[in-house]
Image (cartoon, grey):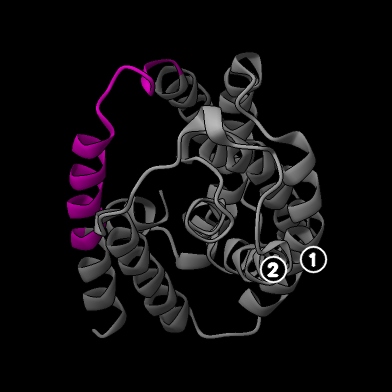
């Protein structure tokens, strides 16, 4: 959303970030309802990680008001490239039925969750591009459980960051309703069809799309 609003619709990076945070909070609510119904969300793990993530989100939102917009665009492009590469790397998937509910390396997961929250508040993303790989690759949580848990956490993270933008006067209400309605509709559809599509196809298509977007954002930042 942030690349689309900055590259296509002409919003400034800070306008796009504030709108994205509101949309992410709404989308998380819509998607997590479906995920909670399936029983795939690890609520206990999500609440523990979200405590430190929220602190990171507030820190990131404060920093966003202090730095040059060009650096926001460059930072976003770097995060997009990281996300694409982490999705493309081959890995052995953990069986959901073998998951004990006791993730490993919890302390390290908390530290990286703080970084994920910081990125969310700074760049207007949900933080899932950090949280999902951390839970899956580092903590041994199956991918679908990690995704569902991340979706539940994202709403809290984004809402907290949005409050900082609100008090600073950077939250733009006029464009919010259509963005939020579109995200709510899309999140409901996405959550319902996610179990019917082969993951490998989505991974590669999404990776190509976000690499292209990252390159475009870098080009804009360096103009």
- Residue at 46% x, 40% y: name it: 143
- Disc 2 is placed on an element classified as helix
Question: In this orientation, does residue 171 appear?
Answer: yes
Verify whether residue 10 appears in magenta: no
Q: Which residues are magenta?
A: 192-212
Marks 2 and 1 in Cβ contact (< 8 Å): yes
Mark 2: few, some, or many residues within 10 Å (few <14, many ≥20)? many
Real-space Cα separation, disc 2 to disc 1, in angstroms: 7 Å
- Residue at 45% x, 65% y: name it: 12
Percent coordinates x, y for residue 219 in the rendering: 21, 77
* Foreground of the two, 95 or 147: 95
* Foreground of the two, 71 or 152: 152
* Foreground of the two, 18 or 209: 209
- Which residue matches tag 1? 55
Percent coordinates x, y for residue 87 in the rendering: 31, 54
- Which residue matches tag 2? 114
Question: In this orientation, does residue 174 appear?
Answer: no
Horizontally, residue 44 falls left or right of residue 94, namely right
- Residue at 72% x, 44% y: name it: 46
Q: Which tag is nearer the camera, tag 2 or tag 1?
A: 2
Horizontally, residue 70 falls left or right of residue 146, namely left
Quadrant where the C terminus is found in the figure: bottom left
Horizontally, residue 124 falls left or right of residue 166, namely left
How many numbered circles does the render carry? 2
Residue 189's image quarter?
A: top left
**Type of secondary structure dominating the magenta stretch:** helix
């Amino acid at each position: 959303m942030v690349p689309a609003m900055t590259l296509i619709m002409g919003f400034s990076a800070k306008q796009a970030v504030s709108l994205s945070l509101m949309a992410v909070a709404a989308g998380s609510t819509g998607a997590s309802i479906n995920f909670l119904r399936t029983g795939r969300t690890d609520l206990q793990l999500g609440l523990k990680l979200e405590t430190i993530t929220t602190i990171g989100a507030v820190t990131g939102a404060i920093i966003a008001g202090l730095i040059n917009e060009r650096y926001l665009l460059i930072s976003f492009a770097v995060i997009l490239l990281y996300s694409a590469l982490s999705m493309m790397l081959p890995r052995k998937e953990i069986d959901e039925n073998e998951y004990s509910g006791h993730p490993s390396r919890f302390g390290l997961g908390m530290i990286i969750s703080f970084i994920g929250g910081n990125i969310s508040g700074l760049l207007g993303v949900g933080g899932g591009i950090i949280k999902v790989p951390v839970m899956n690759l580092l903590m041994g949580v199956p991918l679908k459980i990690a995704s569902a848990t991340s979706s539940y956490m994202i709403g809290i993270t984004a809402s907290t960051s949005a409050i900082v933008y609100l008090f600073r006067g950077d939250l733009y209400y006029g464009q919010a309703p259509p963005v939020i309605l579109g995200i709510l509709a899309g999140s409901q559809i996405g959550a319902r069809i996610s179990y019917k599509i082969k993951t490998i196809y989505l991974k590669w298509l999404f990776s190509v799309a976000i690499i292209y977007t990252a390159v475009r954002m870098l080009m804009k930042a360096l103009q």
